[in-house]
């Protein structure tokens, strides 16, 4: 427990660079909107329909609660008596850390720390996190497969049609390769061809242990009761369908027209590209990626306004809702004695 508290203090230590990076991430969407769309884009945002904005806020709130329900389902009572309110608090605090750190690196760490405070060991917490990511992976693989078939077999009117089709096929092939590698991972690790000069033997063992842990966690997922697996996948599906409908509603609110599946695909591709941004939440890269894919379907001012509204609900709202809970949990954690 002493080492856990020491690690917590180091991770929660605030540095000025953190505030600078979050500030840049907060103002990046506004700056890009004003630069790309000008005053007309800000006018679209100002006249955004209130009923659509309330619907987007409701969907975001439902997404938080669906994730909290999925967390409770995966924990299965192993982290003490965790009600919906407590699970929602952990979810929002973790999402704040995810959105406030480059590459979302703070999200998993915060989740493991908060679960450890409830007596749930970090090793089991890491396995639960991998199971959570596995559910997301299965959902996106299914969606990718459906989008590939739909784009190849139907007369879709998406921009960059051939490029999108080949990109989807490539992503589906990559997902297939990952499945095959994870299926035969022990045999691959025992292969003599793995004994290469680089990386070092220590690095190979380090990587092998983590890959095997990941494989074990995924195997644990498949061994859960079918009813639990079905409930987890239903919650995962509902969450991502709602979450990725926010951009579609934002496009409608600024007077644009785009296919729902195109906005879904746009967010998938743009959020993947946002991992290369050094700013928290993929700021900058996410806006540019989504905006560039929307431009062929609408005017510049409409695309810029839609991106701004989308980021306000899908990113800034997560920061605003999760910050008080993150601060509260951090204060409680730092107050605890290292020998408690």
Image: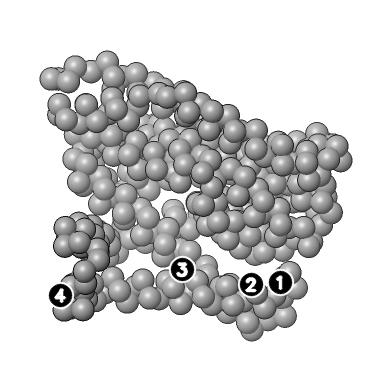
**Gap between marks 1 and 3, in whole Å?**
22 Å
Instruction: Between residue 45 and residue 194, name the one nearer to us.
Output: 194
Crowd tier of the residue under label 3, counting other residues whose Cα lies within 10 Å: few below 14, some 14–19, many 20 or above = some
Query: Which of labels 1 and 4 is toward the front?
Result: 4
The tally of labels here is 4
Look at 28% across and 39% down and name the residue there. 112
Q: Of callouts 1 and 3, which one flags the residue occurring earlier in the amino acid sequence?
A: 3
Q: Residue furthest bottom?
A: 153
Residue 141, disc: 3
SS class, disc 1: loop
Look at 71% across and 37% down and name the residue there. 31
**Gap between marks 2 and 4, in whole Å?**
38 Å
The residue pinned by badge 1 equals: 160
SS class, disc 3: helix
* Protein image colouring: one colour
Could you tell me if the residues under marks 1 and 4 are in contact, i.e. CB atoms within 8 Å? no
Estimate the x, y position of residue 262 in percent, counting from the top left: 67, 64
Left or right: 205 in relation to 91: left
The residue pinned by badge 2 equals: 164
Query: Which of labels 1 and 3 is toward the front?
Result: 1
221 lies above or below 275: below
Q: Of callouts 3 and 2, which one flags the residue occurring earlier in the amino acid sequence?
A: 3
Q: Of callouts 2 and 4, which one flags the residue occurring earlier in the amino acid sequence?
A: 2
Could you tell me if the residues under marks 2 and 1 are in contact, i.e. CB atoms within 8 Å? yes
Instruction: Between residue 78 and residue 320, name the one nearer to us.
Output: 320
Instruction: Between residue 15 and residue 97, name the one nearer to us.
Output: 15
Q: Residue furthest right?
A: 40
The residue pinned by badge 4 equals: 190
12 lies above or below 337: below
Quadrant in the rendering for residue 78: top left
Q: Of callouts 1 and 4, which one flags the residue occurring earlier in the amino acid sequence?
A: 1
Look at 58% across and 43% down and name the residue there. 283
């Amino acid at each position: 427990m002493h080492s856990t508290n020491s690690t917590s203090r180091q991770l929660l230590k605030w540095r000025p660079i953190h505030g600078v990076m979050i500030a840049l991430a907060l103002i990046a969407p506004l700056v890009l909107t004003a630069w790309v769309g000008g005053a007309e884009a800000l006018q679209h945002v100002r006249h955004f329909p209130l009923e659509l904005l309330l619907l987007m806020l409701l969907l975001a709130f439902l997404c938080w609660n669906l994730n909290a329900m999925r967390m409770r389902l995966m924990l299965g009572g192993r982290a003490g008596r965790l009600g919906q309110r407590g699970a929602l608090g952990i979810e929002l605090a973790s999402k704040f850390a995810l959105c406030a750190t480059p590459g979302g690196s703070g999200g998993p760490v915060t989740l493991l720390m908060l679960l450890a405070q409830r007596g749930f060991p970090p090793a089991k917490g890491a396995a639960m996190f991998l199971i959570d990511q596995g559910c997301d992976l299965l959902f996106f693989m299914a969606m990718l497969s459906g989008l590939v078939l739909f784009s190849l077999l139907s007369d879709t009117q998406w921009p960059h049609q051939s490029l999108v089709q080949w990109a989807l096929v490539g992503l589906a092939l990559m997902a297939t390769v990952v499945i095959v590698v994870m299926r035969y991972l022990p045999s691959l690790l025992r292969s003599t061809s793995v004994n290469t000069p680089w990386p070092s033997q220590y690095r190979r063992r380090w990587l092998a242990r983590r890959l095997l842990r990941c494989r074990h966690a995924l195997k644990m997922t498949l061994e859960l009761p079918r009813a639990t697996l079905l409930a987890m996948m239903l919650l995962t599906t509902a969450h991502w369908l709602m979450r990725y409908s926010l951009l579609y509603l934002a496009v409608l609110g600024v007077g644009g027209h785009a296919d729902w599946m195109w906005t879904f695909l746009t967010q998938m591709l743009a959020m993947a590209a946002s991992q290369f941004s050094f700013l928290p939440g993929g700021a900058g890269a996410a806006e540019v990626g989504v905006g560039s894919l929307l431009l062929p379907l609408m005017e510049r001012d409409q695309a810029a306004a839609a991106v701004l509204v989308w980021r306000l609900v899908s990113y800034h709202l997560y920061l605003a809702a999760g910050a008080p809970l993150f601060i509260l949990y951090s204060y409680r954690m730092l107050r605890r004695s290292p020998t408690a």
